[in-house]
Amino acid sequence: MELTPPIEMSASYPPVQEEVARLAGLPEVRAAFDWFRSQEPLFALWQMESTRIAAPPFGEAARGAWLAKRFRELGLSEVQADEIGNVFGVHPGGGSRSVAVSAHIDTVFPATTPLNIRQQGSRLYGPGVADNGAGIAAILAVAGAIRAARIPHTLPFIFIGDVGEEGEGDLRGMRHVFATPRWRDSIAYSVIVDGAGSDTVVAEALGSRRFEVIVRGPGGHSWSDFGTPNPIFVLARAIEAFRQTPVPALPKTTFNVGVIRGGTSVNSIPESASMRIDLRSTSMAEIDRLERVLRMAADQAIDAENRAAAGHGTRRPQAVQSEVAAIGNRPAGELAADARILKVIRAVDAQLGNAAQVQRASTDANIPLSLGLEAIAIGGGGSGGGAHTLQEWFDASARDLGLRRILLTMLALSGVGE
Ligand SMILES: [Zn+2]
């Protein structure tokens, strides 16, 4: 997930605050808090084991199978994977609605990335160790604590390891969860655990749109066909024009060219080349504007390259052509100011003496939020950095604060009888 500057928080809500204080004082909940403190070696083990299993976009099955095993060991019922690889386990309760707690199991790293995961003191190192090794370890820790401390709760808990959160996954896991009647009709609240930390609450869904621009041409020999329009030159022209588009600081709006591919050899004029572009904004209107600018830049680059080739007098009549394909579309959305889940997380933070900021980001929460359902994304505790790089790290110091935060939030949303 990626973050934007904080949104101002308003005051807390006494009735929810009193309920959270009561929950935090229950003997079962205190026992769970002790369990969190004593079981850190187990959490680190889970985190390293899961992170050592490659889980690139569309290749999460092995990590999902590992997670389903852990769900079974922890005594969750109805453990199952759906047809796209989301893994579910239920901790039963009463009532027809339920509270979902989820962590995405995919990473941004291709299957070939060496997953050299290592531990040094309280620190873990390696790609994916925090995003989302920390989230996976956290939902397992919470499931384990509920069982170890025999905590009663009213609404059932649905534990979910979902696929396809990152990049090209385009939130396909969460989309599928909320397209499945059994889950869509029962999940009242979604607590999404993404990455490390305890100091943020994502309550607004940042929208994004992603494109692949594919340019095709006749190709040819670098010497004998010189002057033939070149798809890589087209991309270069388009990028240079698009890059100069002004974007506002508010509403925050960004763009990125993240991948370029194409060509066959150094002495061949390529037959095709492509690039991938990510547009983001808290305003859908800005995303629409950037999309128009991108399409215009691609069209103008094609015209310019074809004109240059014609001017060169090449005998080849074929010209280059481009196609702009949408490869991702994440809906924006936000919680109502009086949403219960927001009152609960604020009360939990007040109870734990935890200072947290409400933020906008693009996470699995985009899907329930865009459907008008209550959802937040929070961290799995500890701290981390270097997300989406090979230098990623996680520090487990004070992980238990993040775990207490998740557990209390789930219990307050579910309800625990007097
Ligand atoms: Zn993540």
Image (spheres, rainbow, N blue to C red):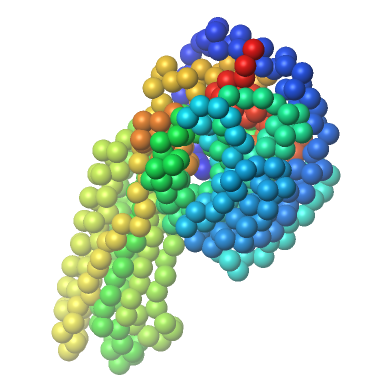
Q: Position of residue 249 (x, y in %)?
A: 38, 34
Q: Is residue 231 above or below residue 175?
A: below
What is the quadrant of residue 159 in the picture?
top right
x and y percentages locating residue 345 in the rendered image: 56, 22
Nearest to the observer: residue 368 or residue 177: 177
Foreground of the two, 356 or 366: 366
Task: Tell me if I can see residue 70 in this picture.
Answer: yes
Which residue is rendered at x = 58% and y = 16% of the image?
Answer: 347
**177 over 230 or under it: above or below:** above
In the rendered image, the vertical position of residue 72 relative to residue 336, given as above or below: below
Q: Is residue 190 left or right of residue 371?
A: right
Which residue is located at x 68 percent, y 35 percent? 142
Foreground residue, 99 or 7? Answer: 99
Answer yes or no: is residue 134 visible.
no
Nearer to the camera, 40 or 108: 40
**Residue 314 falls in which quadrant of the image?**
bottom left
Coordinates of residue 9 in the picture (x, y in percent) = 49, 18
Residue at (72%, 34%) from the top-left corner?
147
- Position of 184 with respect to 2 (left or right) is left
Q: Residue 254, percent across and down?
A: 39, 43
Residue lying at the far bottom of the rendered structure: 224
